[in-house]
Image (cartoon, helix red, strand yellow):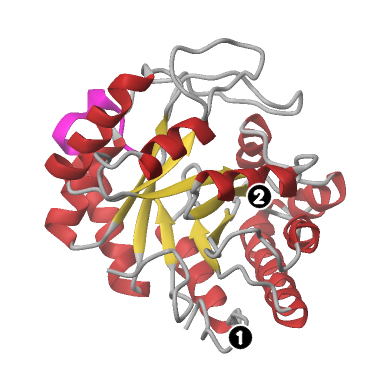
Amino acid sequence: MNSLVSRSAAPSELVLEAVPPEIQQGERGIEAALEKVEGLHREVGLDAVNIPEIREESSKSSKGERRKPFAPRVEPRVLAHRIQEQLGVPCIINRVVVHLERERQLDWFRETHEDYGVNRVVLVGGERSDRQYPGPSVPEATRLLKDRPDAPDIEVGNICIPSRPDEAARMKRKIASGADFFTTQVIFHADEVTSLLDSIGTDVGSSRTPAILISLAPVRSERNIRFLHWLGVNLSNDLENWLISDPEAVTERSLSHIGDVWRDIAEHAAETASPFPISANLAPIGRIPAATTISLARTLREHRIHAPRAMGSVLT
């Protein structure tokens, strides 16, 4: 199994984000999710599947809109176990850590590792920074999993929001806490990532150089874009207006734009010798046709990001 952490060579990572089905859909929903992953894996060769934990939350933008009410979802580790067992594709699961007391966290992760076969997780914090939660913060949970000798052997990821102020300092603190890799919020503007890489520089203050999974989401309609706003995705007015100015070309334009974003990040990473291996997290949010996701994957594979110091390429 490839590791997201850089050792002697940068890993080749093309990751699919797959949202767990609603619990009420039962086995039919899980089978549909498996079929979707299998079809995409057959077409583009996935290195991993990234499964978010969906919880009820409020809109993060006044421009956002969510028409479909929240419905409880299958646990990410349940879907991950089925994907790994039936399709042989490694999985990464997201886990909101603030809702479970610190002393019970290790039991949950140990069970996830031993009973579900999951050894790559992304730790997620609470929705509100002004609220007291019973569980640990993300850095605390990361240290718990990395420092305790009785902790399961799990690769720990953290969330990165490139547009957030002082994100470089946050990332350095998370690396110091033991983060093995990062996955970003959905990105539509290359300068969010390139500015972040410049702010961090080449000295990450650690012998480890965590990989960064860049989340990229094709869109198909104005409604799709409004939901991305609801999730807190940063998308400029100029870009949004260009995407929706021709309703029949929204998908085609979004794919073209994402290709440009990826090329810009690739060129910047090469020119500045950034130490961070960069991979792609395909995030088809909403009812995005499989053909669109496949087209995006193929576009990204055409534009290789060269890792520094003869470490190889991330997408090959």
**x then y, percent, for residue 7:** 44, 74
**x then y, percent, for residue 152:** 25, 44
Q: Note whether 184 is above or below 104 in the view shown.
A: below
Q: Note whether 103 is above or below 4 in the view shown.
A: above
Dot 2 corresponds to which residue? 172
Which residue is painted at 27% across and 35% down in the image? 109
* Quadrant showing the N terminus: bottom left
Quadrant position of residue 173: top right
Dot 1 corresponds to which residue? 309
- The magenta region covers 20-28
Q: Is residue 29 visible?
A: no
Identify which amino acid the numbered label 2 is placed on: Lys
- Residue 18 lies in the magenta-colored region: no
Is 88 displayed left or right of 182 in the figure? left
Is 85 displayed left or right of 113 in the figure? left
**x then y, percent, for residue 84:** 19, 55
Q: Which badge, 1 or 2, is on the more N-terminal residue?
A: 2
Q: Residues within 10 Å of mark 2 (few under 14, many from 20)?
A: some
Is 299 displayed left or right of 53 in the figure? right
Q: Note whether 62 is above or below 222 in the view shown.
A: above
Which residue is painted at 21% across and 44% down in the image? 113
Calculate the distance from the C-alpha at mark 1 to the C-alpha at mark 2. 21 Å
Identify the element where label 1 is drawn: loop
Which residue is painted at 53% across and 83% down in the image? 313
